[in-house]
């Protein structure tokens, strides 16, 4: 048999990032997440936090960013409910929300363990670590009880 692929796994359709140091310069993010910490990077010179985490400050180009923990709760600023077209392995409906965590950091993420009918702007959510295939992790939010 001829081996035409120098891969042990086809990554092209995999929407979950590779998380090991040899595959990802931001592997610390996933190590922190695995430890239950949702983190991002801060530029000590600019005193700005960025999302997504970065290796270089987009303002001053410093490469000495530090890891900081994001708050344990966020506020839903808007949301959308996906009812069709789920990626393989995901079930519908899925809820996505714009979650504001700090004055500087907010982003769109999945909200899990929620009845879509109960979603509302202004609700408080908390980050959760979600296991992903091939010993990886991702983050989502759930309503704060
Ligand atoms: Zn900077």
Image (cartoon, rainbow, N blue to C red):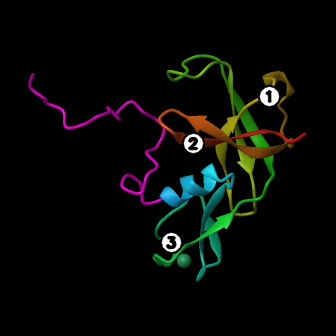
Residue depth check, mark 2 versus mark 1: number of the one nearer the observer:
2
* Nearer to me, 103 or 73: 73
Considering only order in the chain, which callout, 2 or 3, is on the residue closer to the N terminus?
A: 3
Q: Quadrant of residue 109?
A: top right
Q: Is mark 3 within 8 Å of ligand 1?
A: yes
Q: Position of residue 106 (x, y in %)?
A: 69, 53
Task: Categorize mark 2 by other alpha carbons within 10 Å: few (<14), some (14-19), many (20+).
Answer: some
Read off the residue under disc 1: 114
Q: Earlier in the sequence, mark 2 or mark 1?
A: 1
Whether 11 is among the magenta residues is yes
Farthest residue to the bottom: give it.
45
Q: Which residue is mark 2?
A: 137
Q: Which residue is nearer to you in this view: 136 or 38?
A: 136
In the image, the segment drawn in magenta is 1-26
Question: Crowding near pointer 3: few (<14 within 10 Å), some, many (20+)?
Answer: many
Image height of 24 relative to 2, above or below: below
**Image quadrant for the N terminus?**
top left
Residue depicted at 69% across the width and 63% down the height: 69
Q: Which residue is mark 3?
A: 57
Indicate whether 8 appears above or below 24. Answer: above
Can residue 115 be found in the magenta stretch?
Answer: no
Residue 54 appears left or right of 119: left
């Amino acid at each position: 048999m001829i081996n035409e692929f120098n891969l042990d796994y086809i990554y092209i359709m995999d929407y979950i990032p590779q998380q090991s140091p040899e595959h990802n310069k931001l592997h610390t993010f996933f190590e922190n997440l695995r430890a239950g910490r949702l983190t991002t990077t801060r530029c000590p010179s600019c005193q700005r936090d960025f999302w997504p985490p970065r290796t270089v400050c987009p303002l001053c180009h410093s490469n000495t960013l530090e890891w900081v923990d994001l708050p344990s709760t966020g506020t839903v600023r808007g949301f959308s409910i996906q009812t069709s077209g789920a990626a393989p392995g995901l079930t519908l409906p899925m809820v996505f929300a714009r979650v504001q965590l700090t004055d500087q950091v907010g982003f769109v993420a999945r909200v899990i363990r929620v009845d879509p009918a109960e979603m509302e702007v202004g609700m408080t959510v908390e980050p959760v670590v979600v296991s992903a295939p091939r010993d990886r992790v991702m983050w989502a939010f759930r309503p704060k009880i």
